[in-house]
């Protein structure tokens, strides 16, 4: 996507270029917000958000060049950090045990992972879509596939791959953050390739599932990456994408303070219609597009921090640092959005979830 870039500018010691044109239709976009700063890690630069009303997509302008992007991910960024939580005791330990049994039951009932036992609470929960949505998101709603191979692009510290490995998948990761990739290898004994999927020689027709969780919005070259994924997948294999939704309820209400704008690391952000357009152009068959409200509380609290103070504490501390009233409002807002997503307006969830398949030969 950088082959036709404009003259390089110096944006507070970050090399960048103006990107006035829509990445999908190439028409000039409208400026939504100007002179935005990094609100979480204090990376340098002043940035704007542009949008295209035709394609329903938004993007960062000016855009940092690929060679300088590493400067915008400081060592405090969440992919570098291993978070250890103390083991609960007493009543909290029992609650954790029940939650685990409910989760495992839903894995079995909904997704076919048959080596877990069931409990009656989980069987009831599996009949209630918001519970299934929340639990299923942890495995990206991926059903059991004996002998299946799964590649996670932008795998971070490897927690998701470790879980899928435990569920019987043969897994591999790709991660440009060298430190995060090292954590995944050492903590979970998972094969992780350093760099991007475009920089690694992964055989064609070699994986049943390729996942990208909050990765596509970071890419300078989403079209090239999706083309490469198309080749990597076996015929009939599936692409699974999770990314912020610019049509979300929190974005509509918080506007410029919506924390998933995350300048300057989020380069392009989609709506349900624009991500469908992009993926269809590659040759994929769309199987499912929906929006999720699982992380509404988190998104609302992060956006509220920004609205009130102009910045948000870095991951993973901002939820813990929120005051009780902020958490209470976040939970209430999450409930409201969940009701809307499941009953009234299905496109207003905070995250876009897409499943697309490579046609069978």
Image (cartoon, rainbow, N blue to C red):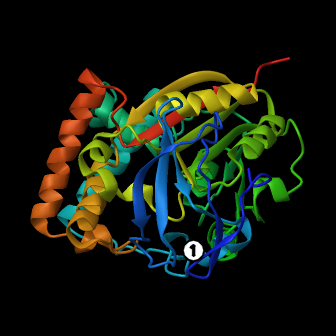
Relative to the observer, which residue lies in front, 170 or 357?
A: 357
Residue 350, quarter of picture: top left
Relative to 213, does residue 279 appear above or below in the rendering?
A: above
Number of marks drawn = 1
Residue at the extreme left of the image, as rendered: 325
Relative to 108, does residue 85 appear above or below in the rendering?
A: below
Q: Pinpoint residue 291: horizontal percent, then vertical percent.
A: 41, 34
Q: Pinpoint residue 102: horizontal percent, then vertical percent.
A: 34, 41
Question: Residue at label 1?
Answer: 73
Label 1 residue SS: loop
305 lies left or right of 168: left
Residue 303, quarter of picture: bottom left
Q: Pinpoint residue 261: horizontal percent, then vertical percent.
A: 43, 56
Q: Residue at x 57, y 74 (%)?
A: 73
Q: Residue at x 69, y 41 (%)?
A: 210
Residue 15, quarter of picture: bottom right
Q: Is residue 282 visible?
A: yes
Relative to the observer, which residue lies in front, 142 or 20?
A: 20
Q: Which residue is drawn at 68% across and 73% down?
A: 68
Q: How crowded is mark 1: few (under 14 residues within 10 Å), some or many (20 or more)?
A: some
Quarter of the picture containing the C terminus is: top right
Q: Can residue 118 be seen in this view?
A: no
Q: Pinpoint residue 114: horizontal percent, then vertical percent.
A: 53, 33
Relative to the observer, which residue lies in front, 278 or 233?
A: 278
Relative to 196, does residue 58 appear above or below in the rendering?
A: above
Relative to 290, does residue 243 appear above or below in the rendering?
A: below
172 lies left or right of 156: right
């Amino acid at each position: 996507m950088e082959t036709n870039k404009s003259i390089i500018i110096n944006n507070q010691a970050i090399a960048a270029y103006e990107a006035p044109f829509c990445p999908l239709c190439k028409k000039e976009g409208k400026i939504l917000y100007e002179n935005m700063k990094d609100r979480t890690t204090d990376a340098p630069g002043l940035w704007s958000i542009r949008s295209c009303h035709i394609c329903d997509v938004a993007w960062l302008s000016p855009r940092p060049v690929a060679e300088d992007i590493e400067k915008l991910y400081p060592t405090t960024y969440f992919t570098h950090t291993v978070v250890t939580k103390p083991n609960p005791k007493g009543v909290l330990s029992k609650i954790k045990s029940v939650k685990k049994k409910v989760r495992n039951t839903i894995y079995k009932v909904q997704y076919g992972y048959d080596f877990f036992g069931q409990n009656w609470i989980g069987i009831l929960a599996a009949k209630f879509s918001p519970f299934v949505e929340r639990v299923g998101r942890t495995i990206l709603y991926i059903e059991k596939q004996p002998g299946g191979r799964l590649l996670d692009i932008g795998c971070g510290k490897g927690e998701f791959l470790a879980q899928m490995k435990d569920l019987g998948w043969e897994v591999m990761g790709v991660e440009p953050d060298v430190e995060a990739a090292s954590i995944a290898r050492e903590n979970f004994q998972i094969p992780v390739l350093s760099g991007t999927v475009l920089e690694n020689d992964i055989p064609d027709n070699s994986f049943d599932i390729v996942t990208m969780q909050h990765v596509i919005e970071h890419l300078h070259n989403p079209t090239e990456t999706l083309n490469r994924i198309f080749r990597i997948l076996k015929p009939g294999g599936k692409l699974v994408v999770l990314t912020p939704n610019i049509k979300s309820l929190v974005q509509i209400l918080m506007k410029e303070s919506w924390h998933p704008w995350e300048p300057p690391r989020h380069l392009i952000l989609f709506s349900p219609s624009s991500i469908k357009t992009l993926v269809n152009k590659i040759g994929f068959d769309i199987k499912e597009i929906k929006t999720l409200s699982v992380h509404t509380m988190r998104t609302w609290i992060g956006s509220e921090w920004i609205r009130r103070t102009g910045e948000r504490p870095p991951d993973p501390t901002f939820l813990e640092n929120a005051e009780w009233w902020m958490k209470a409002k976040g939970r209430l807002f999450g409930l409201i959005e969940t009701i809307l997503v499941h009953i009234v307006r299905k496109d207003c969830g905070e995250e876009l979830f897409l499943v697309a398949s490579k046609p069978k030969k």
